[in-house]
């Protein structure tokens, strides 16, 4: 099994995500319900990276963290776990590597991991690890496909060399989120990408806290010390989170509990970020 699904505690995962669908089968409805439950229950977060720790991607470690300790993770963790769940049920699932386009113009390296799941011969994008602006359910990879999920609209376009682009519709029109080639990636490839994202000084995940939670009508995103809450009606709320409120925001807004030792380390990181900002 490519994604080590034979090691998966499926019952514990279903309990963690609150899956309430019918009997599990490798069909589109099961895929939809599973992905909705996963995205709603397991937050996007990078606390291990922010604290300078390694991020193991073996299934035993992923289950212990995301299921047993009820923590979250970023794309490599989220989608590796979800791939194991899908593989266990009988889905045909493959990894892909994507280039982020949401940050503006400029060619960026392939640093985002996504999944392509084939159901009845049709490929679907399944990505549980993009954060607040990510999809909530699978999206067909047909060129020109458009879907409304909650109050958010997504679409797929096809570029030269078979490049698929996930787009989102906002007040100013369509905008690209990320693009990925048709070449399949394996867990070992996710490991290489994970090493860059968790250790390279230019990675957006190194040296700062990121926690995000998508939803059908509200998206919540914490980056460093700014909490952004955006709604489908176009309204936004932004506020600076004081250092002494950081761990309570992580728990109350994102469902992420950290112990006293990690809370102290996160406060120290925040203080370092503030000093660095003050020197610029």
Image (tube, rainbow, N blue to C red):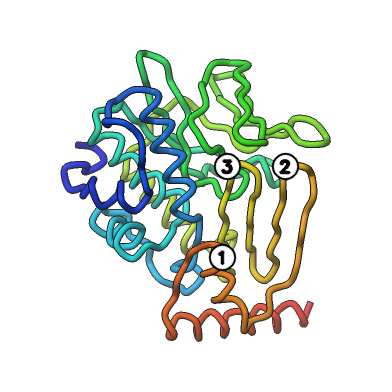
> Residue at coordinates 39% horizontally, 30% vertically from top-left?
31
> Residue at coordinates 62% horizontally, 84% vertically from top-left?
244
Rendered position, 121 above or below 175: above
Q: Which circle's residue, 3 or 2, is located before the other in the chain?
A: 3
Q: Position of residue 159 (x, y in %)?
A: 62, 20
Rendered position, 127 above or below 273: above
Within-10-Å neighbours for mark 3: few <14, some 14–19, many 20+: many
The quadrant where residue 201 appears: bottom right
Q: Using the rendered image of the protein, determine whether residue 203 is visible from the camera's viewpoint.
A: no
**Between 35 and 265, the one nearer to me in the picture:** 35
The quadrant where residue 22 appears: top left
Within-10-Å neighbours for mark 2: few <14, some 14–19, many 20+: some
> Residue at coordinates 29% horizontally, 40% vertically from top-left?
85
Circle 2: element type? loop
Q: Describe residue 104's horizontal placement relative to residue 180 as left or right.
A: right
Residue placed under numbered mark 3 in the picture: 134
Position of the N terminus by quadrant: top left
Mark number, residue 201: 1
């Amino acid at each position: 099994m490519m994604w080590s699904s034979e090691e998966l505690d499926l019952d514990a995962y279903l309990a963690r995500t609150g899956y309430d669908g019918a009997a599990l089968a490798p069909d589109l409805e099961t895929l939809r319900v599973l992905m909705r439950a996963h995205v709603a229950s397991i937050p996007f977060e990078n606390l291990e990276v922010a604290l300078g720790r390694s991020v193991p991607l073996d299934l035993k470690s992923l289950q212990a963290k995301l299921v047993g300790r009820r923590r979250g993770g970023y794309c490599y963790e989220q989608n590796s776990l979800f791939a194991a769940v899908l593989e266990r049920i009988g889905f045909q699932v493959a990894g892909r590597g994507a280039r982020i386009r949401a940050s503006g113009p400029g060619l960026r390296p392939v640093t985002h991991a996504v999944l392509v799941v084939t159901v009845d011969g049709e490929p679907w994008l399944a990505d549980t690890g993009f954060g607040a602006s990510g999809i909530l359910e699978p999206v067909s990879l047909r060129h020109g496909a458009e879907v409304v999920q909650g109050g958010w609209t997504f679409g797929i376009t096809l570029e030269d060399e078979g490049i698929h682009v996930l787009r989102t519709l906002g007040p100013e029109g369509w905008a690209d989120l990320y693009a990925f080639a048709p070449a399949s990636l394996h867990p070992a490839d996710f490991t290489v990408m994970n090493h860059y994202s968790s250790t390279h000084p230019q990675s957006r995940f190194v040296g700062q806290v990121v926690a995000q939670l998508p939803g059908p009508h509200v998206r919540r995103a914490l980056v460093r010390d700014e909490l952004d809450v955006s709604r489908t009606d176009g309204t936004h709320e932004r506020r600076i989170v004081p250092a002494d409120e950081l761990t309570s925001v992580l728990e109350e807004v994102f469902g992420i509990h950290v112990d006293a030792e990690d809370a102290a380390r996160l406060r120290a990181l925040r203080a370092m970020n503030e000093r660095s900002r003050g020197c610029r």
